[in-house]
Every structure is written in C-alpha cells, then in structure tokens.
Image: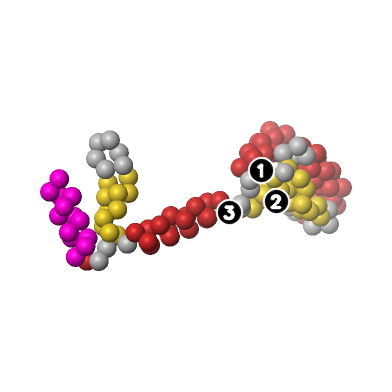
Amino acid sequence: MTDTREALQLAESVGLDLVVVSESKDAPVAKILDYGKHQYQQKKRQRQSAKPTMKEVKLRPNVGESDYSLRIDRAVEWLGKGDSVKFQIRLRGREHQHRDRAAELLDRIVNDLGEAGKVQSLDKRALIVQVTPG
C-alpha cells in the first residue's frame, strides 16, 4: 500500500498521472504517464486497426489448382475481415501470346469470389481485378 502512495506522490511531483495499464489478478501494472496522451494514443491505435487495407495477390496464368484454391480461400478470409483484395495476373515471355487464358482466369476469380465480395473494378487489359467486401 505504501508503494502505491509513493508512486502517486512521485507522479504528482513530476506533473504526470498514475495510470493502471493492466488489471491482472496477480499483480496490476501501473505506469506514471500523461493520461490524456495515453487516451489519445489508444484511440489512434483503434482507428488504425479499424482501417480497411488492400491485400494484393499476384498469379500467373498457369497457376496450379491447389495454389489457386489456397489463394481464393485466403482472399475470402480477408474479405470476411473487411479488407479489399486485388488480384493481378502477371505474364512473362511467351505467356503474352495467351492473354485469353489470363482473361479466363480473371473471370474464374470473379465467379469464385462472387458471394464473398463485390467487384469494384475489372481491367482485362491490365489483368487486374479489385474485390471489396460486400
């Protein structure tokens, strides 16, 4: 009990507050800090974590079935959390001659993610599709 009084006196002498940061059954954790600044930083962290982010998935047109399903499952998970997902199909070398396969893959992605989110933009020329939660 005397430790608490000493800590409180120390905090007041420096012009700060004694704030209980974590209330555990074993030993509560208290810090000497500016309470207003502490509240501001907590609100800032909450806003930061609530902000939706854009996740990006890059594929090749000849992607394997298991790899494709893994990426789709992960995208559904992200959309469930409220994040947007951007799929980009990258072509190299002779793959540019088969852009139709890449366009078919984009259509397949749109169909597979149809129930998890809505298509924000579909650019078959750049081979990019953006899906938002919905």
Give me the residue at 43% from left, 60% from top. 40
Amino acid at pointer 3: Lys
Spatial separation of the CA atoms under disc 3 and disc 1: 13 Å
Provide the residue designation for mark 3: 51
- In the picture, measured across the screen, residue 133 lies left or right of residue 106, that is left
Residue sitting at 76 percent across and 37 percent down?
Answer: 115
Q: Position of residue 30 (x, y in %)?
A: 27, 50
For the C terminus, which image quadrant?
Answer: top right
Place of residue 10 in the rendered image (x, y in percent of width and height, measured from the top left): 18, 60
Mark 2 to mark 1 CA distance (whole Å): 11 Å
SS at mark 1 in the image? helix
- What residue would you read off at disc 2? 86
Going by the numbered disc 2, the residue's amino acid type is Lys
The mark lying in front, picked from 3 and 1, is 3
Magenta region = 1-13
Judging by the rendered image, the residue that carries numbered circle 1 is 79
- Find residue 6 and report its horizontal and vertical position in percent: 15, 55
Q: Residues within 10 Å of mark 3 (few under 14, many from 20)?
A: few
